[in-house]
Amino acid sequence: MRGLLRIWAQPSGRRLPGLAVPLKKDFCRLCWIQTRDFPHAPSVRWSEAARREALQATRTHQLFLANTFYALSLQGARGPRPPAEVPQLDPASLPPLIPGQLRLLEAPRDLLRIHRDRTIVLLREVRAIPHLAQAWEAAESLADRHGWSARLRYDVKRALVISLSCRGPDEPVLYSELEPLAKRQYPVARTARVLAEVGMLHDDRPDLLEQHWTRRLEGATPAIFAQADAWLRHLRDGGPRFKPRSRKTVSEYSRNTAPILVRWSQTYDDLREITRDEIDRTIRALPPGRRRLAPITALRSLFSYLRKTNRIFQNPTTHLKLGSAPTDVLLPLGSEHYRQAVAAARTALHHVALALAAVHAASSNDIQHMKIDDVDLTQRHITINGVRRHLDDLTRQALITYLRDRQSRWPGTSNPHLVVSAVTVFDQRPVSTYSMTQLFRGLKATIDQLRQDRILEEALTRGPDPLHLTAVFGISHSTAIRYSDAARKILHTAAENPLDQEPSLGEQRNSHQR
C-alpha cells in the first residue's frame, strides 16, 4: 500500500488465521528486514541457518514506513528505480475477499476529487476489483427487489466506483465521506444501503437526538448533566430488562425536563439535593391542564431511573399522581369545513385521503401504513386498523384513480404501501408523517378531524353505543366511551334546543358526495 505499512504475518512467521499471506521461506518481509537491526548481528553476511535461528527468537517488531530504508540509504540518492510492469490479472484468479489488515494511519478521503473520466474508465474495468464487483451485484439485487429506474442504477454504480475504487476490501466506507457526493446529485442514501448490504459501511454520523438533548441541557451543572444524560441514553438504548423507548418519546422527555433541570442548576449542584418540597414548588409553577402532565411523567421517569441505579438516595416523586388527562370537547364539523376540504382536494392522493377519513374513519397513521393488499377492489373490501369494511362507490373510484396515477408515475416500484412518494417509491418504508399532515394543513377539517367527525356521526345516528363503535372502527373501549359520552351530550342539547341544530352530519356528507 502506498506509503503505509501492511502487516502480513505475526512475529516468527506464524500466519494469521484466515489470511492468504505471501512468505519467503516461512517468514514475512518484515521479519527478514528486522534482522538488519539485531544488536548481535555479525558484520559478515548471515547464513540462512543463523538468520532463521535469530528469527525464531524474535517476539516483537519495530514498525517502520515503507521504503524508508531505501530512501535514506546511499542508493536512494542515485534516483528512483524504473517502475515495474504490472501484469494484467485474470479476475477469476484473484484471491477471495479476506478480513482486514491493520492500518498505521487513518486519513479522510475526498471523493469529490475523483474525475468523471476516471469514473467512466473504472466502470468498464469493475470486474478487476473483487469487492467492487461484489457491491455491484448487491446493487443489482437491491434494484430488482425495489424497482429502481435505469438512471438510479447507473448513479448508484458510479457512486460505488467512486467510493470503493480507492480503497481495499478491508477498509469500510465512512458515511461522512459519502455525504459530499450529494453535491453532484448522487443517491447517497441508496449507495450507503448497498454498502451496508456487503458490510463495507461505517455509519459515523452523529446522533441528532443526542445533540438535541445536549443543546437543551446547556447551563446545567456537570453532575446534573451527567445524571440526565445517563437517563436519556438508558431510554434510547434500553437495558437488560428495559425496552428502548421511541426516539420521539426520548425527545419529548428531554424537552419537558431540560428547562426544569437548567433552572435547578442555578441553586443545586446535584439531583440528590432535590426534595419533595422542591418538586411540589416546581409542579405548581407549571401551567395547569394537560401541559402539566408531560413534565410530571418525565420527572417521575428520571428520578425512578436514578433511584434504581443508586445515583440518588430516595425518589422525591413517589407522591405524585398523574390522574386522568383532560380531554378536548368533541364537536361536529360544520358544512363550511367540508366545503373547504373538498375544494383543497386537488390530486388523486387528496381524494383518497379525504374518502378514507370522512367515510371509513381512517386516521393519518392508518393511511400512512396501509398496504395495497388491504384493498380488494374485486370483492369491494378494505381493511383499516385490522377491521374489514365494505368498499363504497366513492372510495372505490378514488382508489382506482389513485392506483392508476401511481402506476403511471412509478411503474417499477415494489413498495407494498398504498401511499408512496418520490422519496419512498424505491424503498419499502411508508411515507413520513410530515407528508400526511401536509395534505390538509391550515384547514379545520384535517384528516384526523374528519376521522373524529365520522366516528361522532356514527355515534349520533346509530346511538351512543361504545360496543358498536369498537366493532365498526376498531378503536379502544376508552375511546369509544369518550365518543359515546360526547354524542350523548350533543343529543341532549339538541333535544332541548331543536330549532338551533344544523343539518345532520350524514346529510352534509351525502350532499358533498353528490
Image (cartoon, rainbow, N blue to C red):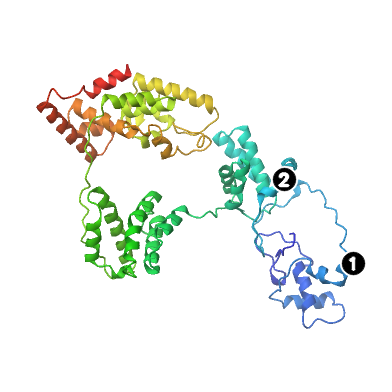
Q: Residue at x 39, y 36 (%)?
A: 437
Q: Most extreme residue toward the left, as rendered?
A: 496
Kind of residue at disc 2:
His
Taking 42 as reference, is 290 left or right?
left
Pointer 1: what residue? 78
Q: Residue at x 71, y 42 (%)?
A: 116
Q: Most extreme residue toward the front, as rendered?
A: 266
Q: Residue at x 79, y 67 (%)?
A: 25
State which quadrant residue 502 falls in. top left
Instruction: From the top left corner, tell me how far across and down residue 338 is, in percent.
Output: 31, 25
Quarter of the image that includes the C terminus: top left
Instruction: From the top left corner, tell me how far across and down residue 410 is, in percent.
Output: 53, 29
Q: Secondary structure at mark 1?
A: helix
Instruction: From the top left corner, tell me how far across and down residue 167 is, in percent.
Output: 68, 53
Mark 1: few/some/many CA within 10 Å (<14, 14-19, 20+): few
Q: Secondary structure at mark 2?
A: loop
Going from N to C along the chain, the mark reached first, 2 or 1, is 1
Taking 413 as reference, is 501 left or right?
left
> Is residue 506 at all visible to an observer of this figure?
yes
Instruction: From the top left corner, tell me how far across and down residue 439 is, in percent.
Output: 40, 32
Badge 2 vs badge 1, beta-carbon distance below 8 Å: no
Real-space Cα separation, disc 2 to disc 1, in angstroms: 34 Å
Q: Is residue 202 above or below residue 223?
A: above
Pointer 2: what residue? 115
Mark 2: few/some/many CA within 10 Å (<14, 14-19, 20+): few
Closer-to-camera residue (110/267): 267
Q: Most extreme residue toward the right, as rendered?
A: 78
Q: Is residue 462 above or below residue 482?
A: above
Taking 384 as reference, is 97 left or right?
right
Name the front one of labels 2 and 1.
Answer: 2
Closer-to-camera residue (499/246): 499
Label drawn at residue 334: none
